[in-house]
Image (spheres, rainbow, N blue to C red):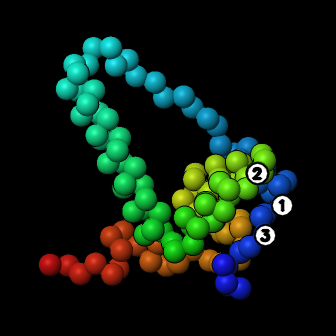
Amino acid sequence: MNSTRPCEFPDPSCIHSLLKRYVRVPIEADKTHLTAGDREALSKLVGAVRHIDTIYWRQRSEIGLELRRKARTSPGRIGDELDRLLSLNFGPWDNLDGDHPFWGGIPLPLAATSIPPTSIAKS
């Protein structure tokens, strides 16, 4: 990482405080009535969503996935919690606080808030 990118993890108490605002909600579905073809189609949809997720991360910022990899390779609970916080926000910006950065001081890129992205030409 270069000097314009955050290197040190945020304060663990900050991470804990931010995560307290989120509640885990289990999402379950009864798949017993699905045919084999339906289950296969569902599996392919889940795979497609994983690719879309990666595309969204890249659209949101050039550093988000890099920071997520750093958190995931860090041992211990703090790395796991930081990974969860990054995943919930698709990067180091707090969606519940006007996209202010919670890791480093880099503001959310303006293009990350444009839907569709401003770089896409209308045709």
Residue 82 visible within the image: yes
Q: Disc 3 residue type?
A: Glu
User: At x 78% / y 63%, what residue is drawn?
Assistant: 10
Question: Of the residues tagged 2 and 1, which is closer to the observer?
Answer: 2
Q: Which one is nearer the viewer's eye here, 106 or 75?
A: 75
Q: Residues within 10 Å of mark 2 (few under 14, many from 20)?
A: few
The reply to whether residue 113 is visible in this rendering is no
Lower position in the chain sequence, tag 2 or tag 1: 1
Q: Is residue 58 left or right of residue 15?
A: left
Q: Do the CB atoms of the residues marked 2 and 3 lie less than 8 Å apart? A: no
Query: Mark 2 near mark 1, Cβ–Cβ under 8 Å?
Result: no
- Please give the residue where the numbered disc 1 appears in the rendered image: 11
Residue 15: image quadrant is bottom right
Q: Which residue is mark 3?
A: 8
Q: Secondary structure at mark 3?
A: loop
Give the image location of residue 39, x and y in percent: 28, 26
List the residue tagged with mark 2.
75
Residue at (22%, 19%) from the top-left corner? 35
Is 47 rendered above or below residue 105?
Answer: above
C-alpha gap between disc 2 and disc 3: 14 Å
Tell me the SS state at disc 2: loop
Q: Is residue 83 left or right of residue 117?
A: right
Crowd tier of the residue under label 3, counting other residues whose Cα lies within 10 Å: few below 14, some 14–19, many 20 or above: few
